[in-house]
Image: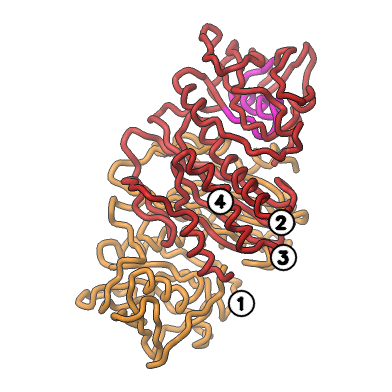
Chain colours: A orange, B red
Amino acid sequence: MNELALVEAIRGYTARPGRDKSLIASIGDDCAILRPRPGEDLLLTTDFVIEDVHFRRRAHATAAVAIGWKAMARSLSDIAAMGGTPRYALVSLALAPWTTAAYVRGLYRGMTRLAEAHSVRIIGGDISASPKLTLDVIAIGSVPKGKALRRDTARPGDILYVTGPLGRASAAGYHDQPNPRVALGRKLLGKATACMDLSDSLTLDLHRLAKASGVAASLDPLLPAAPGATLENVLFGGEDYELLCALPPAARPPRFLTRVGHLQKGAPGALTFAGASLPPRGWLR
Amino acid sequence: MNELALVEAIRGYTARPGRDKSLIASIGDDCAILRPRPGEDLLLTTDFVIEDVHFRRRAHATAAVAIGWKAMARSLSDIAAMGGTPRYALVSLALAPWTTAAYVRGLYRGMTRLAEAHSVRIIGGDISASPKLTLDVIAIGSVPKGKALRRDTARPGDILYVTGPLGRASAAGYHDQPNPRVALGRKLLGKATACMDLSDSLTLDLHRLAKASGVAASLDPLLPAAPGATLENVLFGGEDYELLCALPPAARPPRFLTRVGHLQKGAPGALTFAGASLPPRGWLR
C-alpha cells in the first residue's frame, strides 16, 4: 500500500459525523487547525507505543485492535490525570515490514473505538517506516482556565488516594485494555491538590509526584490490590492507568477513591512503606 | 543513563529564560498546559525523523546536531506552510542502543538552536527505546483567526510560485540544514489563495495541492533550479522545504516569489509539464 492510498484509507477510518466548531481543518493539510474556546486551557501530551518495548508482535488483526486501544489509552490517561477532557488526537505511525493493510485497519479500529467513547477526534499525524511498528499518539485536551491538576502542588499532610485497585495489568501480563479515568479525573477538579496517572508503578509515580511537590511520602501497610495481584504487582507493576491524587487532610474523599498513604515533610521524593525506606522501581516505558 | 536522569538532562537542554504568559506548565508533568490567546487559531503538526529512513547513522555529535536541526525544521516548515508562527514543540525520542548521552545532547543542541531562532519552546515529549533512533517532533503554532493558508483553496487560473530555487537538498545528497520559511509564509497571509511546503517533491506536493483544490496544474518549461541541481532534482527531489503557493492571476507577486506554473480546470491533481502529462513522483517520507 503506498502512502497516498494509506492516507486516504486512514481518512476513512477516522472520519466522524457531526460538526465541531473548534475544528477548522483536519487530516489532509500541512497542519490541523483548532479554534480554542474562551475560558479554557489546553493540555498537550504525547506517548510512544513501540513493538518489543510496549508490546510483542502478534500479527493477527485482533492484536492490532488491542494495541491501537492501548496507544490511545496511554495518551488519554495523561489528559485524565490533569482533570482534563480529551478532545483531539494526532497519530504518528511508523509501519514495520510485516504490517499489512488489514493490520493498520485494526490499529485504527482500536484507536477510534476508545477515541469515540470519549468523543475524541483523530485530526492529523504522520506515516513512515521502521523495523519495529511505532505509534506516537498526541492527545489534546481542555480544562477550565487555571484548574488543571498538576503533580507539583501537593502539600505535607495531604492524604493519598487511588481510583481503583492496583497491580491488575502486571498480574495479567499486560494483556489488557486499560480504561483512562477521564470522568473521575474531572470529578477531582477543585478537590485534589495534585494528581497524576499510574503508568510506570505506584512507587515510581508517587516518587515523581512527591519529588515535584517537594515532600516525602508514606504508603499505608494495607494497599488495594486487584484480584490475583501480589504486593510486588501493586508496588512495582506498571500500566494500571488508575489516578493517584492528594487531598487535604480535612477533605471528605469522594467514594470512588481508596486511601493508599499520606505526604509529609522530608526529603523530596523519599518513600516509606511499613516503616522502612522503599526504593522507587517500575517499568519505565 | 536512566530515564529519570535523562528527563532531568533534557529539562536542562530545553530551559529558556523569559516569561511566557501562554505557557502555564512545561516538561515534567503529565501534560503541558497552554493558555490560548484570543483571536488566534492554533496549528498542530507532527513529523517523524527515523534512522535509515530520513538519515543514516553517523555516531559523532556533529551529525546529531544536524539531525536534531532537521527534525525541528520539518515540523516548523509545516507551520510556515500555513502562514503561522511556530510557538511550541513536543519531542518524542526513541533511543537506539548506540545512542550515547553526548549524542542526545547533540540532538537537543540542533533542535534548540533552530527552535530558539524562531522563539519556539520545547514544552514536553516522551522517551522510549527502539532499534533505530526515532524522533517525532510535534509543533504548535498560531495564526490570526480564520487566516491560515490551506492547500484546498486554490482556484483555476491561479499562478503558482515558490519561495526559492529547487533541487538543492537532493543535489547535495540531503546533507543540509533546511531553513523553514516562517517569515515568508507570514508575508503570504491574505495574499496566497493556497500554500504548502515542498517536503517530498515539486511534482508530488503540487499534485496534492491541486487534488485538494479540485484543479489541474501546469508547470512552466523553465523552473528555478538550485546550483548543481538537475531537472530530475527540481521535479522529483524532496526536502527543499521551500513554500509552494498560488496567487490570483491579477495579483502582483511579492519579490521573494518565483513563478513555476499555473492552475487550470481539469482532472483534480493532474500535472502537465512542457505540454505532456507528468506523473507525480518523490521521496515519500
Q: Is residue A1 visible?
A: yes
Task: Determine whether the residue tagged by mark 3 lies in a helix, strand or loop.
Answer: loop
Asked if the residue under mark 2 is in contact with the one under mark 4, i.e. CB atoms within 8 Å, the reply is no
**Residue drawn 71% across and 56% down?**
B59
Determine the secondary structure under disc 2: loop
Residue B109, numbered circle: 4
Which amino acid lies under the numbered mark 3 shown in the image of this protein? Arg
Tag 2 subunit: B
Q: Along the line of sight, which residue is nearer the eye, B98 or A19?
A: B98
For label 1, the residue is A173
CA distance for labels 4 and 2: 15 Å
Q: Is residue A17 left or right of residue B41?
A: right
Query: The residue under label 4 is which amino acid type?
Result: Arg
Disc 4, SS: helix
Furthest toward the bottom, the residue is A275
For image coordinates 31% across by 79% down, the residue present is A263
Pinpoint residue B93: horizontal percent, then vertical percent.
59, 57
- The disc placed on residue B146 is none
Residue located beneath label 2 in the image: B59
Mark 1 secondary-structure assignment: loop
At 65% from the left and 28% from the top, the residue drawn is B208
Label ID, residue A58: 3
Mark 3 → mark 2, Cα distance in angstroms:
33 Å
Q: Chain of mark 3?
A: A
The crowd level at tag 4 (other Cα within 10 Å; few <14, some 14-19, many 20+) is many
